Image (spheres, rainbow, N blue to C red):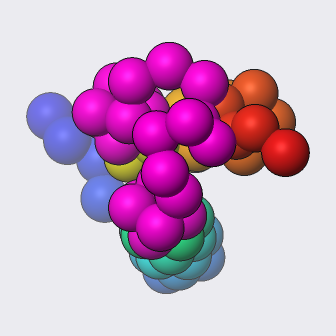
Amino acid sequence: MAKKLTQRQARIVGIAVVVQFVIGALTLRDISRRSSDQVRGPKWLWRILGTANTSGSAAYWLIGRRR
């Protein structure tokens, strides 16, 4: 049987979803604005990883971008 979330828990989940969405959108925007030679590896792969979860976005920002 599914247990209902408390109001506080639902608020935390809602904030986490919004944060993930914003980080994913910023990651996609950065990938689309960079040329392929400014990205380590294929851009299509970073698009998938960057929107899959927050750690994928973090990996792109830390590893996937060339300076």
Q: Is residue 38 magenta?
A: yes
* Residue 52 spot, x, y in % from top left: 36, 37
Query: In which quadrant of the rendered view does residue 15 lie?
Result: bottom right
Q: Looking at the magenta stretch, what is its main secondary structure?
A: helix
The answer to whether 3 appears left or right of 51 in the picture is: left
Check the image and name the residue furthest to the top. Answer: 41
**Residue at x-position 60% and y-position 25%:** 40
* Residue 34 spot, x, y in % from top left: 53, 57
Residue 33 visible? The answer is yes
Residue 6 visible? The answer is no
Q: Is residue 22 magenta?
A: no
* Residue closer to the observer: 53 or 26: 26
* Residue closer to the observer: 48 or 52: 48
**Residue at x-position 84% and y-position 45%:** 67
* Residue closer to the observer: 19 or 36: 36
* Residue 61 spot, x, y in % from top left: 72, 45
Q: Relative to 20, does residue 58 appear above or below in the rendering?
A: above
* Residue 49 spot, x, y in % from top left: 42, 31
* Residue closer to the observer: 54 or 59: 59
Q: Relative to 8, does residue 38 appear above or below in the rendering?
A: above
Q: How many marks?
A: 0
Q: Relative to 66, does residue 4 appear above or below in the rendering?
A: below
Q: Which residue range is magenta in the image?
A: 27-49
**Residue at x-position 63% and y-position 42%:** 38
Give the quadrant of the N terminus.
top left
Query: In which quadrant of the rendered view does residue 65 lie?
Result: top right
